[in-house]
Amino acid sequence: MTPDTISLRPHIAAISLGLALATSAVAIAQPASKAGGSPSASGASATQPGDPLVPFGFVFGRTTKDEALATWAAAHVVITGGGHAGVGAGSGVDGQSTLSVDRIFLVDVQAVPFFGTRPARFAFLDNKLYSVQTVLSRTLPSNHRGDNSQNLSPEELNALQADLRKRFGAPTRTARDLMAGKEPDIMEWKLDARTLVLTTGALPGATLTLTDPGLAKKAKQASDEVCKQYVACAGYGRNRR
């Protein structure tokens, strides 16, 4: 990302849902009830309740992928896809990336209770959950299988932003992308050990992301380690900064 305005954007989107599902992704497009495992109500221990902001009460840095799959199985939640994150040219366009980050695994889930009910992507670093993101509107068509999200209208996006401001106060930080008008199209709220980011830009579209910033930084380092091994990817990465 070369322009200073874009450099203000948190790395969250590039680390979590913005990362593509690599072409080597393991397809798990099936009802979660077939995923197997022992059901877990929240992925949290009895002495530590789940996080009320994270879907299903999962806890960043503690809920494992297996615990999440077991919870979805018990709740008959539909999983639409999953696989290791991809980096390099095509990153952000599912199915196009050819480089896989083995330490990051992404799972797409249908009808998630996340500031409304929408499909969402759960990102796991070293088998621990660190990010959840939902696409609110998509400017470009997606070729990702199982994506049945419905675009929010500009009025609905404004209503969501107003609701977030009412719940959490004014954003901790705002920024403008190159495509932004006079108003910021990136809004970030610091919520204890979590960060909530609403993007409403024209490209690639509007998203809402909740993440653990410390783990997200480690996830970016993991993807960078893979990317720098390949000349084409490393050059692509420099162009994005």
Image: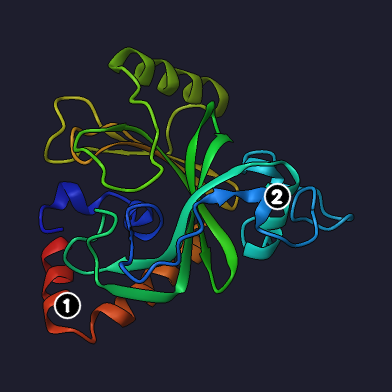
Structure colour scheme: rainbow
User: In the shown orientation, is residue 188 left or right of residue 212?
Assistant: left
Q: Is residue 60 above or below residue 173?
A: below
Label 1 – label 2 distance at C-alpha: 39 Å
Q: Residue 187 appears in which quarter of the rendering?
A: top left
Q: Would you say residue 173 is visible in this rendering?
A: yes
Q: Earlier in the sequence, mark 1 or mark 2?
A: 2
Q: Residue 21's quadrant in the figure?
A: bottom left
Disc number for residue 139:
none
Helix, strand or loop at mark 2: helix
Q: Can residue 187 be seen by looking at this rendering?
A: no
Q: Give percent across and percent down for residue 119.
A: 48, 37
230 in relation to 137, above or below: below
Which residue, given by chain and number where applicable, does mark 1 sit on? 234
Location of the C terminus by quadrant is: bottom left
User: In the rendered image, which residue does mark 2 sit on?
Assistant: 73
Who's the residue at 26% across and 50% down the image? Answer: 8
Tell us which disc is closer to us: 1 or 2: 2
How many numbered marks, from 0 up? 2
In the displayed orientation, state which residue is furthest to the bottom.
229
Q: Secondary structure at mark 1?
A: helix
| Residue situated in front as seen by the camera: 14 or 113 | 113
Would residue 235 be found to the left or right of residue 185 on screen?
left
Horizontal and vertical percent position of residue 9: 28, 49
Q: Nearer the viewer, residue 37 or 124?
A: 37
Asked where in the image residue 136 lies, by quadrant, the reply is top left
Q: Residue 116: x and y, percent?
A: 54, 26
Identify the residue at horizontal 18%, vertical 32% (top origin).
202
Q: Amino acid at mark 1?
A: Ala
Q: Quadrant of the N terminus?
A: bottom left
- Give the class, few, some or many, for how many residues have Cα within 10 Å of label 1's Cα (few <14, many ≥20): some
Which residue is at a point 34% across and 51% down the rendered structure image? 13
